[in-house]
Amino acid sequence: MREYKMVKVQEQPLLRDKVANWFHEKWKVPVEAYLESIDICIKSENSIPQWYVAMLEDEIIGGLGIIENDFHDRKDLTPNICAVYVEAEYRCQGIAGKLLEFTCEDMNKKNIKTLYLITHHTSFYERYGWEFLCMVHPDGEEEQTRMYIHRNR
């Protein structure tokens, strides 16, 4: 595979629209919500929100964000990794793992030692040092989903 790079959107503000549109296409959340969050990320010295993408030349092949709460009932479990996605043709190549590692390291540098995420996956995140924590209720859903925790050391 050709070499891809990890990008902190905060450090690459010209990617704003491209990143917002890419996440919107993947998750169907209004593009305006991504633009608002990315604008805060770019303009703020705060650690949250943050957005990260894996790029192959000028193509986004994966990405994720860090937000306060990923639409679940445990508002005390924060911040949350959200919107983890890797393009189908690039899956099973370790890109999601590299994105998670890159993000956790960046958050550690920002003195954020604990991160959370929700998912329906049952074994994927364990490979990357995440531990199952508890079940939570996603906003507007009856079924519970899994909450994972990652502790930076």
Image (cartoon, rainbow, N blue to C red):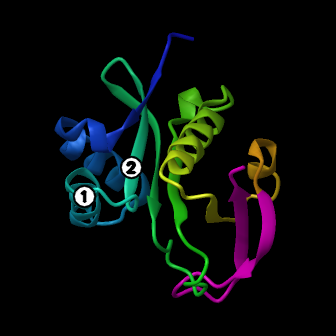
- Please report the residue visible at 59 percent of the width from the left and 31 percent of the height from the top: 95
- Give the image location of residue 84, x and y in percent: 53, 51
Horizontally, residue 150 falls left or right of residue 19, namely right
- Give the image location of residue 74, x and y in percent: 61, 84
Q: Compared to 46, does 73 lie above or below?
A: below
Q: Compared to 146, does 18 lie above or below?
A: above
Q: Work out whether residue 29 or residue 81 is closer to the camera in this orientation and state it.
A: 81
Q: Work out whether residue 104 or residue 136 is closer to the camera in this orientation and state it.
A: 104
Instruction: Determine which quarter of the picture holds residue 37.
Output: bottom left
Q: Compared to 105, does 49 lie above or below?
A: below
Horizontally, residue 88 falls left or right of residue 14, namely right
Mark number, residue 123: none
- Is disc 1 placed on a helix, strand or loop? loop
Instruction: Determine which quarter of the picture holds residue 43.
Output: bottom left
**Distance between the alpha carbons at the discs numbered 1 and 2:** 13 Å
- Please report the residue visible at 42 percent of the width from the left and 43 percent of the height from the top: 52
User: Which residue matches tag 1?
Assistant: 44
What is the three-letter code of the residue carrying label 1?
Ser
- Is disc 2 placed on a helix, strand or loop? strand
- Give the image location of residue 15, x and y in percent: 23, 37
Mark number, residue 51: 2
Q: What's drawn in magenta, residue-wise?
A: 131-153
Q: Compared to 2, does 56 lie above or below?
A: below
Q: Nearer the viewer, mark 1 or mark 2?
A: 1
Q: Is residue 46 magenta?
A: no
Label 2 Cα crowd, 10 Å radius (few <14 / some 14-19 / many 20+): many
- Please report the residue visible at 52 percent of the width from the left and 88 percent of the height from the top: 140
- Give the image location of residue 125, x and y in percent: 74, 50
Horizontally, residue 124 falls left or right of residue 16, namely right
Q: Quadrant of the N terminus?
A: top right
What is the three-letter code of the residue carrying label 2?
Trp
